[in-house]
Amino acid sequence: MYCFSLLLTLVASQLPFVSAASISTESGDTDGAVSVDISDALMKRISHLEAKLKKIETELEKNEVKDRLSSNKGDAIEDSVRNVRDRRDAGDGLQQLPGQTDGIPGINGCPVTVTPFSIGGSACLFCPSGPRGDPGPSGQPGRDGRDALAIITPGFQEMTSSQTTHFADNPSHHSNTSGAVYVRWGHKECPTSSLLVYSGIAAGAFRGETGNGANQLCLPSDPVYSEPVAGVGASRSFLYAIEYQIDNFPTLSDRSWHDVPCAVCKAPTRFAQLMIPGKNLCPSNEWTLEYRGYLMAERAHSVHQRSMYICVDQEMQTIDRTHGSATGALHALLDLVEGRCVSSGGGLPCGPYVDGYELTCAVCTQ
């Protein structure tokens, strides 16, 4: 209806111009001739205005489609264009005059939920992804490990590379820090470079029994049970105290048949732990020597069972009032370990290793 009113307004605005032009150019004609000239001029002007109106109408349709796309209301542009045309054909817009042809249909619309682009004005497609961007710049180098340790363990005295440098034991400062954990076999206490977690007694399997475990354990002196069943079970594994069995070694023979103590220790600010068999020194000054001693295990014998090799502190402390006897006693044993080499080949390499020498050991942390 708006378009038809606009046409009438435009026609009315042109009537004085048409009448004046017709009268001035055709003043000698009769009234009938003047009327025909005015009618022809009016029809031409109407046709001209109709063309302008169609152009305006097309622009209005495009604007309405654009408004719907930007508002993101979820309606398809194709429906919007069809509604505009339906309203026009129903009488809301300018009616097609006789002798006029239909316009060319517009392009198909795109859904409002995507961003369209067109190819040649006739196709609506999805926008493609852009090219991959360049890699970003490299980040700053991280802090080295020594600086990180300083952050994790504030308030501690910095450890030097010397094996002989230790810090004083202060549980209030060290109790919440991380560190390497190790067992000090043959001793009730930890070295000054470490903290005592607990102390106890070394235990293992009976030498004459098959089965059981092969490793030694450091049992705490205050066990806690959970719903125990009284009596010795038939289908069980057993643990016994470990005793020293040292013969023909004058400096340590008096430890024989005594139970072996142990201590579980934590080395603050150090996270690697290493037991070195055959040597009582650490690899370098970057390592801290926790203790040195002798390599020991269950005795090599036809009726003795295998066990793990452990490093026992060279002091080889004993548990008081535990002197036993080798005859008929139920216990596990720890014996010194000797290296065996044969000059003709086999065994350990002779030269660095001497056949029959007792092997030392060291426990180191870093």
Image (cartoon, grey):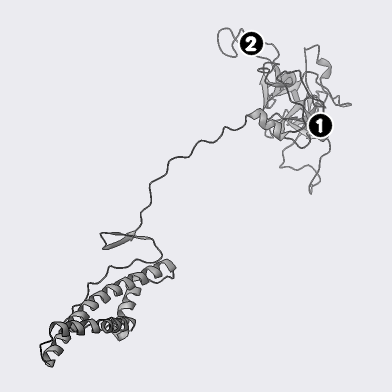
Q: In this view, does 350 lie above or below 79?
A: above
Judging by the rendered image, the residue that carries numbered circle 1 is 199
Residue 356, x across and y down, in percent: 68, 11
| Camera-side residue of 105 and 74 | 105
| Camera-side residue of 320 and 21 | 21
Label ID, residue 11:
none
Residue 16, x across and y down, in percent: 24, 84
| Whole-number angstrom distance, CA of label 1 to CA of label 2 | 34 Å
Quarter of the picture holding the N terminus: bottom left
Q: Residue at x 81, y 32 (%)?
A: 200
Q: In this view, does 234 lie to the left or right of 136?
A: right
Instruction: Give residue 310's quadrant in the image.
Output: top right
Under circle 1, the secondary element is strand
Residue 130, x across and y down, in percent: 38, 50
Judging by the rendered image, the residue that carries numbered circle 2 is 353
Q: Which residue lies furthest to the bottom in this view?
A: 31
Q: What residue type is labelled 1?
A: Ser
